[in-house]
């Protein structure tokens, strides 16, 4: 009867441990990439929705008789919050349409061309102050560009 030696068993467990460690590292890296990509896509999507609503002149009921000026995306850079919201601007009335938070370890970055808010004008969807939304995390950076015509572009 033939049996395995203790050295052979230890060697098999060592190989299994190495393969498991490599698998966990790869999964963690993949997961970080997915969280980063998803976060950037969500911000770009909300920017596009705001522009679309401004062009179509969709006015929330909370504005009442006050004319709609446009839709704004407001970015919160303070502390750990890292959230952003879509607002309808009706004169001096601000109606919060949706509020979201960046996932995971993502943060907005104020750079030389970074912006803290962007307003899409009603009916045209243009912006008076074009700029970039810079998001970083997990060792990656992404810049969402908003040009003067209101187009939202990802790299």
Image: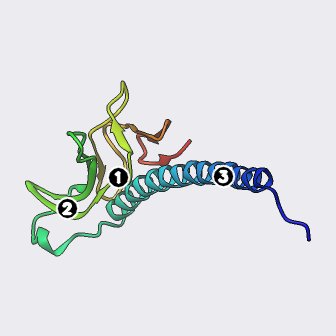
Q: Which mark is residue 102?
A: 1
Q: Mark 3 falls on what kind of element?
A: helix
The residues bearing labels 1 and 3 have C-alpha atoms spaced at a distance of 35 Å
Side of 3 where 139 appears, left or right: left
Q: Nearer the viewer, residue 31 or 154?
A: 31
* Residue 151, horizontal then vertical, whole percent: 46, 48
Residue at screen point 38% across, 46% down: 105
Instruction: In the rendered view, tell whether residue 111 sits above or below residue 35.
Output: above
Q: Nearer the viewer, residue 93 or 1?
A: 1
Task: Work out whether residue 11 can be spotted.
Answer: yes
Categorize mark 3 by other alpha carbons within 10 Å: few (<14), some (14-19), many (20+). Answer: few
Task: Give the image location of residue 82, x and y in percent.
Answer: 28, 46
Q: Which residue shows up at 56% across the image and 41% down it?
A: 155
N-terminal label among 1 and 3: 3
Q: Nearer the viewer, mark 1 or mark 3?
A: 3
- Marks 2 and 1, Cα distance to the nearest angstrom? 28 Å
Choose the circle earlier in sequence order: 3 or 2. 3
The circle drawn on residue 68 is 2
Q: Which residue is mark 3?
A: 17
Q: Are marks 3 and 2 in contact (CB under 8 Å)?
A: no
In which quadrant of the rendered view does residue 63 lie?
Answer: bottom left
Q: 155 or 57, which lies in front?
A: 155
* Nearer to us: label 2 or label 1: 1
Give the distance between the C-alpha atoms of the residues marked 3 and 2, in whole angstroms: 61 Å
Q: Residue at x 31, y 39 (%)?
A: 128
């Amino acid at each position: 009867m033939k049996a395995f030696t203790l050295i052979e068993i230890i060697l098999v467990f060592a190989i299994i441990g190495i393969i498991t460690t490599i698998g966990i590292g790869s999964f963690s890296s993949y997961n970080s990439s997915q969280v980063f990509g998803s976060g950037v896509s969500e911000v770009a999507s909300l920017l596009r929705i705001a522009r679309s609503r401004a062009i179509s002149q969709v006015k929330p009921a909370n504005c009442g008789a006050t004319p709609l000026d446009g839709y704004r995306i407001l970015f919160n850079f303070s502390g750990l919050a890292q959230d952003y919201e879509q607002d309808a601007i009706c004169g001096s009335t601000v109606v919060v349409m949706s509020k979201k938070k960046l996932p995971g370890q993502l943060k907005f970055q104020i750079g030389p061309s970074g912006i803290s808010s962007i307003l899409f004008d009603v009916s045209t969807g243009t912006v008076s102050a074009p700029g970039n939304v810079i998001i970083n995390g997990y060792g990656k950076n992404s810049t969402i560009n908003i040009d003067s015509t209101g187009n939202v572009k990802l790299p």
